[in-house]
Structure formats: C-alpha cells, structure tokens
Image (cartoon, helix red, strand yellow):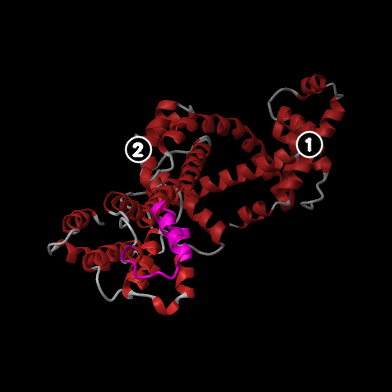
Amino acid sequence: MHPDHKYIAGLLDADSDVIDEIYALHANKIIGWVRKNGGSVEDAKDVFQDALISIVQQAQKPGWELTCPFSAFLFLVCQRRWYNELQRRKREKVTLERFSGFEVVDDAEQQAEYALRDYQEFLLFQKAFNELKDDCKKVLSLSWSGIPQKELAEQLGYTYGYFRKKKTLCLAALISLIKSSEDFRKINEE
Amino acid sequence: MNQHNLDKNKLAKLEDYLAGDLPPAEEKQLRQELATDRDLAKTFELLKKIKSQHRFQETESRLRKAMERPTGKYFREEKSPYIFRRGVFIAIAAMALLLLVSKFIFQESDVVSSLAAEYLSPPQSLSLFRSGESQQGGQQEQQIIQLYEAGDYENALKLMKDLQSRFEAEHSSEFYFDLGILQLFANHPSEALGSFQNVKTGHTFDLQWYRAWALLFAKQNEEAKAAFDELATQPNPFQKEAQQLLEFLP
C-alpha cells in the first residue's frame, strides 16, 4: 500500500483534518496553475473539488489502489479536469502547460481519465434521476436500498406486483433519459 | 433491444438478476441472452452503473459538505490591495480629478479673492470728476459719483458707458482710467484692460497697479506677476503691497 494512502482513507472517511491538510498542501498550487492556464480562482475551486470527489469515487471501487504519490495523482486529475473544461468552453483543442516535478507511473494518467469519466457519468445520472417524477425517485431509491421489495411495497401501500411494475417503469424512464442525453453519447464515444 | 424502446419484461428480469432474485432456470437463460444480445448486455452494464452511481450520491454529498470549510479558507478570491479595487479606485480617481479641477477653478480664484480683499481698494474718488475735466455729464456725473461712493460699480459703469456713447469725442486718459476702474471693480477685468490701454498720460503707478489687478482677475497670471514685479522693484506707493502680493500669488 502506498504511504500516501492515508489521504485516500481520510477522504473516504470525509475526515476533516485530512481534507484540511490536502487543501493546505495543494490548493495554492492548483490555483496558480489554473490561473496560469486561463482560469480563475473559482475555476480552480471547482477543479479541485471535482478532482477529489473523482478520486474518492475510484477509491471506493474494489481493488483500486493508489500507485503514485497522492499529490501527483491529484494534479493529474486536476489537469485533465481543466483540460476538459477548456475544451468544453472553447470547443477546440487546447494545449496546457503540464505540472512539473511529479513522477507518475504509466497507468496513472489512464486512472485519472477513468476517474473523471466516472464522475462525469455520476453527474449525468444524477441529473437524469432528478428529472424523474417524485414517486419514481422514491420507488427507485428505496428499491436500491437493499430492503426486501415486499417490505417496501407494504411501506408504500402498494401491492407487490404494482411495486415491481412501477419500479420497472421508473427504471425504463431513467434509462431513456440517460441514453437520450448528449453527454452520455459523448462519454461513450470517448 | 432498442435503446429507446426498452423491453420492460427484460428490464425487470435484469433487475431481479442483479438483486439475485431470479430463479436458476431464468438466470441461466438470461446469461445466455446477455452473451449474445449486445444491446441487452449494454443495458445490463448501464443498470449496474446506475445502481453503483446512485450509491455514490451519499458519499458525494458527505464529501462536498466536508470540503465546504477548507474551500472557503483556501479558495478565497484574492483581493487586490484596497486602493486597487475597482470601486475604490474609481472613487479616488474621481476625487483626485475634482481636486485637480477645483485647484484651477476654485483654489486659485480663492487666493486671488483673499489677496484682493486685503490689498485692493478702489481709488478714493474718480479722477475725471476730481480734475473737473468733464463738465458735460452734469447730473449724470453726480449719479456716477454717488454710485461709485456707494460701491455700486455696475450701475456706475452703466452710466459711465452711457456718458461715453453720448460724448464720444470728449474722452481723455482720465476718463479711460475711471472707466477702467469701474470695469475692474464691476468685475469686467478684460474690459478694464482695454480701457487702461487708452490711458496715455498720468497715473504712472496707480495705472500699473490696477492694470496688474485686471490682469490677475482676467487670469493672465504671468502678465499680472510681471506687472506687480515692476511695481515691487522700484520705489512707488504700491511697492510694499506688490512685494507682499508676489509672495502669495500662486
């Protein structure tokens, strides 16, 4: 296990001391780099937050391990995240100055890419989920909670059959929303 | 399976399969279908992702909350020094401009006004009538004297100009000096300068003194200073005042 895993563990636990340490160590450098590459402090804030969340999302996956220093991986994700944002804004290829002074293992860049793609997908799914009607949101959230369906049906005052049918219809609506999204097509094209 | 026209039965089966609720026979059949039906396999993958992404929602919210405080602490918009902030800068620039303008518009005229209050006074009487050169105005001359003595220079000037227009050929250097004095004290310095120019004889030092004041009121500062300087450098009734004035003139 990489010695910097303590940062990952702290993030997974939402440990405020660890999070504060990460900010204290890296925020300024990210601000400086984003500003140097056409962004603002506000942009740097979004980049930093999204990068940390993306990393946590990867870290939750079974078998995922940090293979390089945490700072190097964080900067890779931030760099990639800002690159994507610039592309989105300008709709053209952009060249960014790379962070210097970090040695990363070969697959770290790919891991950074996956991390951002997964998080982008998460945001897309969340957006689609929020577009569902309230009863659908409730049925789906409950059905994914691990509580037996018969219990949930009773809880909602539905028959078991109706609950199942309702759940399937809501799921179909969600999938349809996701698949019809332009962002979904883009993510799957990449 | 068409991506926009989902087979609800298949979807229900996929859900049951993921939940481990599918009977073994149906599970086996579904596995076979997943191996051959690409669209169904894609929907199955998407379904798995949706479920796992949904689980991450709670973690994401928790993290965002935990990041609020350090974000506020470390990602503050760097404020430029107080003096360079836009609003402050504009206010300061406007004040500076106002001061600069007021320096020219008000300050200088304030200095001149206060110097005039201290050093400038009109001649005790109008020389024209004192010398008795002009006898033609009669009653009008008396009115001018009264107005002059009462300090009503504007009305005295009006009558003087009327006199000038009626007796055009009669004007002497004395007349022009008096006219210039009235114009000067009625606050028409440029006109006074014109009248003083017509004074050909007499009034050596007092002409120079009042002309210098007319130049000052007409904002011809350099010419005014030169005129006062002439008075300051030679013995004359105005020498001391001229020297003092030159000390204070901006």
Q: How many marks?
A: 2
Q: Residue at x 49, y 40 (%)?
A: A49
Q: Where is A17 relative to B15, above or below?
A: above
| Residue A65 on image: x %, y % | 44, 38
Report the side of B28 relative to B198 (left or right): right
Majority secondary structure of magenta residues: helix
| Residue B150 on image: x %, y % | 42, 51
Work out which quarter of the rendered image holds the C terminus of chain B and state it: bottom left
Q: Which residue is mark 2?
A: A25
Dot 1 alpha-carbon crowd within 10 angstroms: few under 14, some 14 to 19, many 20 or more: few
**Displayed quadrant of residue B229:** bottom left
Relative depth, front residue between A75 and B195: B195
Q: Where is A71 relative to B164, above or below?
A: above
Q: Which residue is mark 1?
A: A133
Report the side of B188 relative to B5 (left or right): left
Q: Where is B48 relative to A109, above or below?
A: above
**Which chain contains the residue that carries disc 2?**
A
- Magenta-highlighted residues: B130-159
Mark 2 / mark 1, whichever is N-terminal: 2
Q: Residue furthest bottom?
A: B169
Question: Mark 1 falls on what kind of element?
Answer: loop
Q: Amino acid at mark 2?
A: Leu
**Which chain contains the residue that carries disc 1?**
A
Residue B174 forms part of the magenta stretch: no
| Residue B187 on image: x %, y % | 41, 60
Q: Is residue B37 visible?
A: no
Q: Residue at x 16, y 59 (%)?
A: B239
Are the residues tagged 2 and 1 within 8 Å (C-beta)?
Answer: no
Question: For the residues marked 2 and 1, what is the alpha-carbon distance in whole angstroms?
Answer: 43 Å
